[in-house]
Image (cartoon, rainbow, N blue to C red):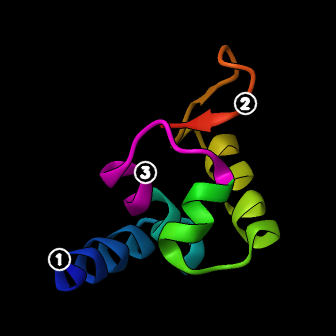
Amino acid sequence: MKNQNRRAESLLAGVGLTGLEASAYVALLREPGATAYRVAQLIGKPPPNTYKALDALLAKGAVVVDESSGSKTYA
């Protein structure tokens, strides 16, 4: 699975995502509907950096946010 994740992250970097954005995106593919904190846990990065990466993905239209449950989740 790690090799597949690395390959996907490499391909995503090829279309303009940073390494952290690509890691967060792949994590959301595995676990859609995760909070930013959960994504940080999945990729082993600090939450503040992960929040910034998810905000960048949102600005690029690569993820969507759901706030209907009271907490922000991403897919």
The circle drawn on residue 75 is none
Q: Residues within 10 Å of mark 2 (few under 14, many from 20)?
A: few
Do the numbered discs 1 and 3 sit on residues whose CB atoms are within 8 Å? no
Q: Residue at x 73, y 30 (%)?
A: 71
In magenta, the rendered stretch is 26-36
Q: Measure how far apart labels 2 and 3 are at the Cα level.
A: 16 Å
Kindly state the secondary structure of the residue where label 1 is placed. loop
Q: Is residue 17 visible?
A: no
> Does the magenta portion include 28?
yes
Give the mark, 1 or 3, whose residue is nearer the N terminus. 1
Q: Measure how far apart labels 2 and 1 are at the Cα level.
A: 29 Å
Residue that label 2 marks:
71
Residue that label 3 marks:
28
Residue 52 vertical placement versus 31 (above, below): below
Q: Residue at x 48, y 36 (%)?
A: 33
Residue 63 shown left or right of residue 35 in the figure:
left
Q: Amino acid at mark 1?
A: Met
Q: Measure how far apart labels 1 and 3 are at the Cα level.
A: 14 Å
Q: Residue furthest right?
A: 48
